[in-house]
């Protein structure tokens, strides 16, 4: 951005010479868009693991299960949930990746077929972004000589290397974050004494969701309390609902 602006300003004063302008400040800007993808996957995975496992354990406990039954149910929930999250993420990110690959192939074919039209297309993109026409031609030519396909993917389709869809990485991080999240209520239910098991599992589940919600918000650049509040209200309602249903089923079915 700084470089483009510098080139643009330089060209207004002395057209057609583009001195290298070094920014006078050395402040490092912190952007968060490149983090959004994996933060979303991690927070979603861990939150699902905590809430679905915690709720399932409370539902089963509400129906009168003992520690052994709770642990069995909890391990099954962890395994099933982590696999489901991982596979779901793999499928969804793979289709995104397929779209990117198809776009890349189409763009490469267009470049091979009609490089002049593609150059004009690139120039028009820069004009639309505010560069004067002669400068837009120069930028389009320079970038095309350097890496025409990369320039088209980035400036025409918005595909960059940092933002590229990575199915396996997404699947793996969803799987792990769900499993880690699920371990919190599961270990609490397994280790707490009989008399406080339900209470301890409830508290551990809600606390974990609050901490995670706050962390997710802050990593994404929003105030922590906002995420904690969102997830805390929703999560507590889900836990209460599951426990009550477990209670009702436990007294009527068993
Ligand atoms: Zn193009």
Image: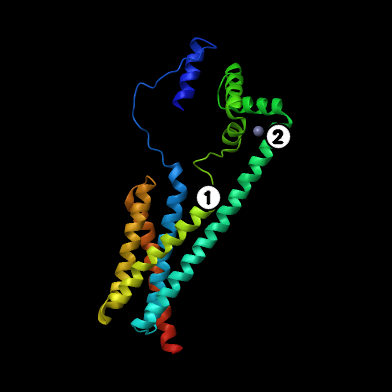
Which quarter of the rendering shows the C terminus?
bottom left
Q: What residue sits 32% from the left and 58% below the top?
A: 211
Q: Residue furthest right?
A: 113
Q: Element at badge 1?
A: loop
Is residue 12 positioned above or below 198 on the image?
above
> Residues under labels 1 and 2: Cα distance?
25 Å
Is 137 displayed left or right of 186 in the figure? right
The image shows residue 11 at horizontal and vertical percentages of 51, 14
Instruction: Tell me, yes or no, if residue 104 can be seen here.
Output: yes
The crowding category of the residue bearing disc 2, from other C-alpha atoms within 10 Å (few below 14, some 14 to 19, many at least 20), is: some
Instruction: Decide which of 97, 128 is in the foreground and name it.
Output: 97
Q: Compared with residue 114, is residue 8 higher up or lower down, i.e. above or below?
A: above
Which residue bears the numbered disc 1?
166
Give coordinates of residue 51: x percent, y percent.
Answer: 40, 66
| Mark 1 / mark 2, whichever is N-terminal | 2
Q: Is residue 81 above or below residue 136?
A: below
Disc 2: residue Cβ within 8 A of ligand 1's nearest atom: yes
Element at badge 2? helix
Asked if residue 243 shows in the view, the reply is no
Quarter assignment of residue 43? bottom left
Q: Where in the image, quadrant-wise, is ligand 1 located?
A: top right
Q: Report the residue at 40% width, 20% height from top.
A: 22
Q: Residue beneath label 2, please? A: 110
The residue depicted at 58 percent of the width and 34 percent of the height is 150
**Residue 238 horizontal/vertical position (percent):** 41, 69
The answer to whether 30 is drawn above or below residue 57 in the figure is above
Measured as percent of width and height from the top left, residue 134 is found at 60, 16
């Amino acid at each position: 951005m700084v470089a483009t602006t510098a080139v643009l300003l330089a060209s207004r004063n002395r057209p057609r010479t583009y001195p290298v302008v070094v920014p006078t400040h050395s402040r490092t800007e912190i952007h968060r868009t490149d983090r959004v993808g994996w933060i979303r996957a991690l927070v979603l995975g861990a939150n699902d693991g905590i809430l679905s496992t915690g709720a399932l354990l409370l539902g089963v406990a509400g129906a009168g299960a003992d520690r052994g039954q709770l642990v069995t149910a909890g391990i099954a929930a962890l395994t099933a949930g982590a696999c489901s999250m991982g596979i779901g993420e793999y499928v969804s990110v793979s289709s995104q990746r397929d779209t990117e690959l198809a776009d890349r192939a189409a763009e490469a074919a267009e470049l091979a077929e009609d490089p002049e039209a593609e150059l004009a297309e690139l120039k028009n993109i820069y004009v639309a972004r505010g560069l004067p026409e002669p400068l837009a031609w120069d930028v389009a030519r320079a970038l095309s000589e350097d890496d025409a396909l990369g320039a088209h993917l980035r400036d025409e389709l918005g595909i960059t290397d940092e933002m590229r869809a990575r199915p396996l990485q997404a699947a793996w991080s969803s799987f792990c974050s769900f499993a880690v999240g699920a371990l919190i209520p599961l270990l609490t239910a397994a280790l707490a004494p009989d008399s406080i098991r339900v209470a301890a599992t409830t508290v551990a589940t809600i606390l974990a969701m609050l901490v995670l919600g706050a962390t997710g918000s802050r990593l994404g650049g929003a105030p922590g309390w906002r995420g904690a509040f969102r997830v805390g209200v929703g999560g507590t309602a889900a836990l209460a609902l599951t426990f009550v249903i477990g209670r009702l089923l436990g007294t009527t079915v068993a």
